[in-house]
Image: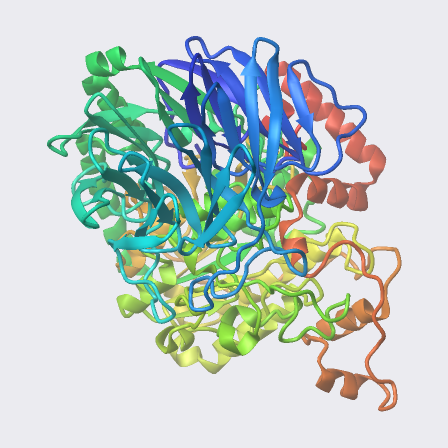
Amino acid sequence: MATGRRVSPVGTLVGTPNFATSVVVAGKAAYVLASGATHTQTVTAYDARDLRRLGQVSGFKGEIPDNVAAIGVIRVAHQDFFQGLAAGMDGRIYAAGGVSDGLLALHVGHDGFKVLRRYALAYHAFPKDQYPYRYQGSRGGAYHFYPDGVAVDQDGRHAYVTGLLSNAVARIDLDTGATQYANAGPYPFAPVLTDRGHRLVVSDWGGCGVRVLDARSLKPLGRVCVGPTTGPDNADPGIHPTALVTVPGTDDIVFVAANLDEAVEVDTRSLKVVRTFDDAPYSGAPPGSYPDAVAIHGGRLFVANAGNNDVAVFDLTSGRRLGLIPTAWYPTGLAAGPDALYIAAAKGLGSGPNLEHQWVGTMMPGTLQRISYARIDAELSRLTKVALSDNGFALGQREALGQANREVTRRLRSHIRYVVFILRENKTFDEELGDYKAAGRWADSRLALYGPRELPNLFAWADRYALFDNFYADGEVTAQGHQWVTGASDSDFVQRTWPQYYSGRGLVPNPGWTQSLVPAKLADGTGGIPGGAANPYAIYTDLPKLGRWSNPWIAYPERLYLFNSLLAHHVSFEDFGEFVSRNEAGVIAPAMRAHLAVNFPGWDRMILDTQRAHVAVDWMRQHAGDLPHFIYIWLPDDHTAGRSPCYYTPDYYVANSDQATAQIVHYLSTTSQWKHMLVFVTEDDAQSGADHIDAHRTFTAVLGPWVRHTQVTTRYSQVNLIRTIEAILDLPPMSQWDANAAVIRGLWREHSDDSEVPVHPMQVPVAYNPGVCPDGKLLRRLAGASGQTVTAAWLRTHLRPDAGEPPPKADDRYTPTSLLKVPGPEQMRQEWIATKGRASYDHTLRYLRALANRQHAPMSHFVASDDDD
């Protein structure tokens, strides 16, 4: 894993398609649903004893390409899958269809899969006073039910399906197809039947517990709430109720609250909590286990911990935890077979060699793991030690780490009182520093897309200060990356849903920022402020003032973000461009708003980083006598806009971002606070380029008077940066990751050097991508060059009084916000061709194939690449 944690799955293991989210066992087969961000999503059957693959249904996002063929695969056009999978009668399997709005009935026989029937499901309006308050599907399109959870009654006559975007549950007559609908609470995750099939229980992912309904009429019978009562004024993070299971011989169910690290047993008749199972890995652990699957067998409760790559085993009678079973990366599904436990893990064995060749966002094949109950009984004590050790949770490990961290923290606090964190976008180490010869074997010049011409300041800092060569992003894509660098984790909601909106499957991006729910009034965005897509200042605006915008409240981890911790512990800070937490209605607390640079533009490809730097430096000059102790600055230009017409070229974006970063660092080095300051410069993820070590590898440069010149080859990741910031500013950890991460050591000077840091001039002239440049887009670029957006006031100032607003024109395929989630393979291809040409791109791919062959690894180990089915 990126954090350096190990995975040691035991038992029989087989690879699955990427991001396996559920598993069921029926008869002699185990079935796995995988819903990664690929062009296909799948249901795969495996022999229940040896995990030999029996067949697969592959749902294509669109039409089936003519050149696609695979043995034993049934291909279905316009079919998606998302999370839910259930077994019915006579070997039938039912799969939730996500944005394709259906329940797919399947059967596996001796000759493989057959598609029996597709049950269509329709959007069902939810109450206006229920979160998310506004429909949060794709902008401007049809409203979707969005099936995501399935249960089938004992006689196989009815299926119950939850609808994520409908806040609803559907009851389907499997013979006739007749369907009833009822409200099921915010973002319903999964249904389960109890009380001999008379009661239906639904977990509300965006609620505070579970709802109980009459299984026949769908009449609500009540709900059980175990967290803060949800509602518009609630600013606490959600508890994230996810998977649930019935307790045999009772009317009870057990559900897991992913954000609380708890499993909760509920009496569905009395609507009372029976007891709570503490799922923390050790006493006093912060949140981060992320339980998201549950099963019961033989008097034991099994809880899959996605965050810790293990399954906790509890005694169902006493509630005592018996031990842990190590799994592959990010377990998401459990099924209790008659002889063995089956575990689906979304990220499998990580980014090492595997059979599937996928983009960094989906490059890791999932896994299906089978471990017999006999082995669990015989080896649980040993397996528990392995699981704890893999995560660094063993008592001896934690004590040794704590001692080492205290020693380096004392030294840091004696010299450093100010921390500045500068975040950029989407680059691997080799992509930007492959030509840095001092890095030796850590750099591969053949994969360098940029170098000292575009990045003169980064290369100069590497020569003067500390450069981390063996440094990793903890997430795969932007949606996760900004969570990791602000919260030291990303919630289960982010992990499970980002593949859906990155692959264009009907969800509005929801990682932390708010997103417009309606298209801009004009294709270029000029008429859409504040209600359209092009508003770079929306990040700090309360949603009721914006109009129809998404509210990312459900995406928050349990302890929220670094900014909340700074606020709670009275540490001064200023945030330039990063998201902050809102309440359920989308309002930012006044105390938080006081620390936000509201005139700093967020995501907008037409506003350059040098303009952002100007805003930040101007603010710091005005507060020179009392700079805050923590400053966070987002400079996203090195993401680039690929070859999209009318935007700046990739070379210029990267060079401009380097210049902007240098201007900020130079100003900081002239302040009186510089002698006690530390500056981190890093990337949110590594999804856009190639790297000869690992596709998660990026870089961090550390600057400051107390930083010596060194190449840091110790393995670090983003959580180490967060842990170091917390150590300096005396903040507690927010999650199990930063709580068990090392404070950075090995780069601190004995005596300070507080000389100024110069700005090396740009060597790349301003240039634009060729192609059609509609009037509206050109105006956006003209306005952005001075840090402005196209508003009516700007138009009156910069156009003839009689010119009026430009007419709508056809725009290219990227909107201002969609550029943020262009998949890494496409971003890499466009940047490479724009910078070095098609021949160089083809030559680089040939080199990567040869490198992969020599190391007996797939190309996906080194480069963001499309999935290769």
Q: Residue at x 29, y 37 (%)?
A: 194
Residue 167 placement, left or right of 317: right
Q: Is residue 340 above or below residue 183?
A: above
**Coordinates of residue 591 in the picture (x, y in percent):** 35, 76
Percent of width and height locating residue 751? 35, 54
The quadrant of the image that shows the C terminus is top right
Please tell me which residue is depicted at 66% across the width and 70% down the height of the picture: 532
Residue at left offset 50%, top offset 26%: 93
Residue 127 picture quarter: bottom left
Q: Is residue 121 above or below residue 601?
A: above
Q: Position of residue 710 (x, y in %)?
A: 46, 42
Q: Residue furthest left?
A: 318
Residue 47, compared with residue 541, is above or below; it is: above
Give 683 or 243, whichever is nearer the viewer. Answer: 243
Q: Which residue in the rendered view is the most extreme toward the bottom?
A: 801
List x then y, in percent, for residue 828.
Answer: 70, 41
Residue 418 visible, this orientation: no
Comparing 597 with 865, the one in front is 865
Q: How is the image coloured?
A: rainbow
Q: Is residue 430 left or right of residue 616?
A: right
Between 534 and 550, the residue placed more toward the observer is 550
Which residue is at the front of the view, 380 or 137?
137
Q: Quadrant of the N terminus?
A: top left
Labels in figure, total: 0
Does any portion of residue 34 appear in the rendered image? Answer: yes
- Quarter of the view holding residue 232: bottom left
